[in-house]
Image (cartoon, rainbow, N blue to C red):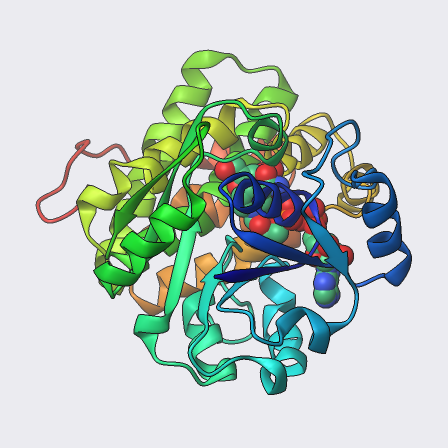
Amino acid sequence: MRAVVMGAGSWGTATAKVLSDAGTDTTLWCRREELAERINASHTNSDYLAGITLPANLTASSDVAEALTDADLVVCAVPAQSLRSNLADWRAHLNDDATLVSLAKGIETSTLMRMSEVIAEVAEVPDDQIAVLTGPNLAREVAEGQPAATVIACTDLGRAERLQQTFNTGYFRPYTNTDVIGCEIGGAVKNVIALACGMASGVGFGQNTLATIITRGLAETIRLSAAVGGQIETLAGLAGIGDLVATCSSPLSRNRTFGAHLGQGATMEEAQAAASGQVAEGVKSCTSVTALAEKYQVSMPLTEAVNRVCHDGLPVADAVSSLLGRKTKPEFLPGES
Ligand SMILES: NC(=O)c1ccc[n+]([C@@H]2O[C@H](COP(=O)([O-])OP(=O)(O)OC[C@H]3O[C@@H](n4cnc5c(N)ncnc54)[C@H](O)[C@@H]3O)[C@@H](O)[C@H]2O)c1
Ligand SMILES: O=P(O)(O)OC[C@H](O)CO
């Protein structure tokens, strides 16, 4: 088994470390040759995970053909909105039998497609060769070897089980799932809800508000996932509530931090500048998730409010008033969460 992780940002680097620690021969592909050389020389990726020592057997490369040739496992670790163009560049070098694993938590804005759908279309591989890895996995904590669990979802359970062994280490524990849709919707929507939690904490609201946003955010996630074809139980697991709790609570989350800047009164440009080039997927996915909800006629008021703050200039205070000013309703409606 030879694995390649395509993308050397925070999570790509941490995932390559997990694979190496699990005993898998792994290459980390970097866009910049200079970064690949630095990683090989210093065994650190100081641009994204400063202070973390990478395994000596983990090698970096900026050569797409060299990285992908003979790779049995291709882990896609670039942001959701650039996955399509990257895959188009990589396609010619992909091994026909390779398993493709998606790490990105987002919905493509131009097509409203999930990442596994983008991979199937662009790489022209069947669904059962595509898996999704998702869960409460803040990159720095995983890279430090702190205990965490994850979900590996694939419509082919046998493939998911083989991947489970490939990623399993003493600190990183994968569970399998065959509900790819539920896992992907969970991963994409939690970033939007984390933006809302960040906004609330930036304004100065406390734990009651955060718990309310997380819980009602989960209700939105379940409604959308069910409409698209996912299973409700998935959202009661690591890919749903697990990831929501981690991302909405942690100062390490880029989405929560981005939202906190907005809640403190920063402009979108200022919040973007503070992110230092690291991706907060929810900023773009709030638009695609809102559109997906409209397409499936699902009510997602928190998501819609985040989208209006990020892209229509709605002040955070007005978003709060409009959410609280909605008509009251039962917590659970028949056929709805
Ligand atoms: N960081 C985390 O804790 C974490 C955990 C789980 C999942 N994820 C998800 O993983 C995905 C990648 O996140 P990350 O944390 O590694 O992001 P990052 O911002 O740390 O790094 C992104 C990587 O993609 C590359 N990149 C950026 N724009 C690109 C483009 N247009 N074309 C090609 N490459 C490009 C960058 O050079 C970098 O290597 C995201 O969807 C994120 O939601 C992140
Ligand atoms: O830093 P964020 O907000 O992109 O979140 C990171 C991970 O997705 C947490 O599981």
The residue at 56%/26% (across/down) is 145
Near-viewer residue (195 or 333): 195
Query: Which residue occupies the foreground of this view, 228 or 317?
Result: 228
In the image, is 244 to the left or to the right of 334? right
Residue 33 x/y as whole percent: 87, 62
Number of callouts in the render?
0
Question: Height in image: 283 above or below 113?
Answer: above
Q: Can residue 88 be seen in this view?
A: yes
Compared to residue 290, the image places residue 150 above or below, namely: above
**Most extreme residue toward the left, as rendered?**
334
Q: Where is residue 5 in the image (x, y as percent from the top left)?
A: 61, 58
Q: Which residue lies furthest to the right in this view?
A: 34
Q: Nearer the viewer, residue 125 or 187?
A: 125
- Left or right, 109 with respect to 244, comes to right
Which residue occupies the foreground of this view, 314 or 335? Answer: 335
Query: From this viewpoint, is residue 283 visible?
Result: no
**In the picture shown, does residue 140 fall above or below 96?**
above
Give the position of the C terminus as an image quadrant: top left
Q: Quadrant of residue 54?
A: top right
Instruction: Give the residue displayed 83% in from the left and 41% down from the top.
Output: 47
Q: Which residue: 60% across, 54% down?
A: 26
Q: Position of residue 129 (x, y in %)?
A: 36, 72
Q: In which quarter of the image is ligand 2?
A: top right
Left or right of 224? Residue 112 is right
Instruction: Give x and y (percent) for residue 172.
Output: 44, 33
Residue drawn at 58 percent across, 27 percent down: 141
In the displayed structure, 7 sits above or below 190; it is below
